[in-house]
Image (spheres, coloured by chain):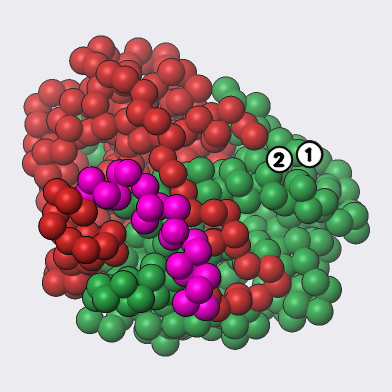
Chain colours: A red, B green
Amino acid sequence: MIKEIAGHRSVRQYRSDAVPQEVLDEILAAAVRASTVGNMQLYSIVVTTSRSVLDELAPLHFNQPAATTAPVLMTFCADVHRFSMWCRQRGAEPGYDNFCWFMNAVTDALLASQNAVLEAEAHGLGICYLGTTLYNAREIAGVLRLPAGVMPVMTVSVGYPVQMPPLTDRLPVDAVVHYDTYTDYTPEEIDRLWREREASAETAELLAVNGLPNLARIFTERRYPKADNVAFSRKYFDDLVAQGFFEQ
Amino acid sequence: MIKEIAGHRSVRQYRSDAVPQEVLDEILAAAVRASTVGNMQLYSIVVTTSRSVLDELAPLHFNQPAATTAPVLMTFCADVHRFSMWCRQRGAEPGYDNFCWFMNAVTDALLASQNAVLEAEAHGLGICYLGTTLYNAREIAGVLRLPAGVMPVMTVSVGYPVQMPPLTDRLPVDAVVHYDTYTDYTPEEIDRLWREREASAETAELLAVNGLPNLARIFTERRYPKADNVAFSRKYFDDLVAQGFFEQ
């Protein structure tokens, strides 16, 4: 397996060392080699290294150490603005401010991000994907001064690791793979897929700390409860409208 | 730069040779190493190799050669169904059938896809991302028998290349990169960023064939005209509702 893919883990605490510009350049050059819909490159990467802007972004990522200790935050944005501007300058009428093209632009942004991540790891850096970007997209757009047609999708924190955490466990590969068509899960199969994780020492500790009887309830009652999910859904959707992606 | 990242291109015509199961296994093992929100693995990969299902999928990808000649189509799906089933089996109330978690699941699916793509290329395979998945998501969901909570996001065709096409040109890296905050483009900068592509022999040929005065109008009048984009936006959004992602 490609070494960087096999060795990937999320690093949530970084040393204060800056990332040299030539390393950032390699990471960004790798990002732009990813496939992009129609070769339109409908994304932008905002690379934040200045302390004052990092300090504005950190609370929007809930001040998690992966955000507060990172010397670099890369915010990957869906961007139909640049391409649309080019079209207008050429007397062509763009029509990319809609949901389908948001999805195309999200795809571009995320494929580029994964290339950037692997390349960063090839240079000895650690990274963490910050899903909090979805929760505070409007506020992040404000800090980063994103114009209409540009929407934050994902932030990657980058820095030299304080230490390398162990690889994260995953469900057995067959949990996510279906051949030819989707074969729905039986209750027994669900039990089998989660068995190892539910039996782990890490899970036992989580249950004790949280006073809950099983791991699923840690997700639904502590980490990602429904009420929060619904509220963040509405917010991100509203933000998407506000950034001009539903102009149809 | 990581060799597979530097050498990535879209391959749109494949030899008829099957992809050995052990190679597919390596590709899928690489896919699951990608980061995933909360380690929840909210995606499924439907690996289609049987001729009859491939033949049902091909027209949904508009019978492009990348679909019709591929021995393998991998449909990456946002999947909150499996995780929700596990929650319910444990007496936990899931709340992931909403837009925010669709976006989380899309992220999981696309990061996994890029790992799969690079690993496939490490094994001498060629791939092509088929964005047509967004256009016919409902029909693809039907062929693949996706239950509620599972939504097609991207298809990757995989096979041994008939020939390796040249690397695709990209805009200069600084076209997509902003430091600290977003710096909007001036008209002069837009001209500079597209200059090389607009001056290429390939563009000259496209203009001649299409009888259009510039490259932007090839995009807006031939490839991705506004009326189509709006229609596909509505369709994908409706499909998303139909697959149960707006149950809030």
Amino acid type indicated by mark 2:
Glu
Q: Which residue is mark 2?
A: B121
Amino acid type indicated by mark 1:
Gly
- A111 with respect to B144 (left or right): left
Between the residue at mark 1 and the residue at mark 2, the CA separation in whole angstroms equals: 5 Å
Q: Are marks 1 and 2 in contact (CB under 8 Å)?
A: yes
Assign a secondary structure to mark 2: helix
**Front position in the image: B83 or A109:** B83
Return the mark for residue B124: 1
Image position, residue B61 (x, y; %):
67, 72
- Whether residue A36 is situated above or below residue B97 in the rendered picture: above
Residue range (magenta) = A186-206
Which image quarter: residue B76? bottom right
User: Is residue B218 visible to the viewer in this orientation of the structure?
Assistant: no
- Whether residue B131 is situated above or below residue B175 in the rendered picture: below
**Front position in the image: A230 or A93:** A230
Image position, residue A61 (x, y; %):
16, 44
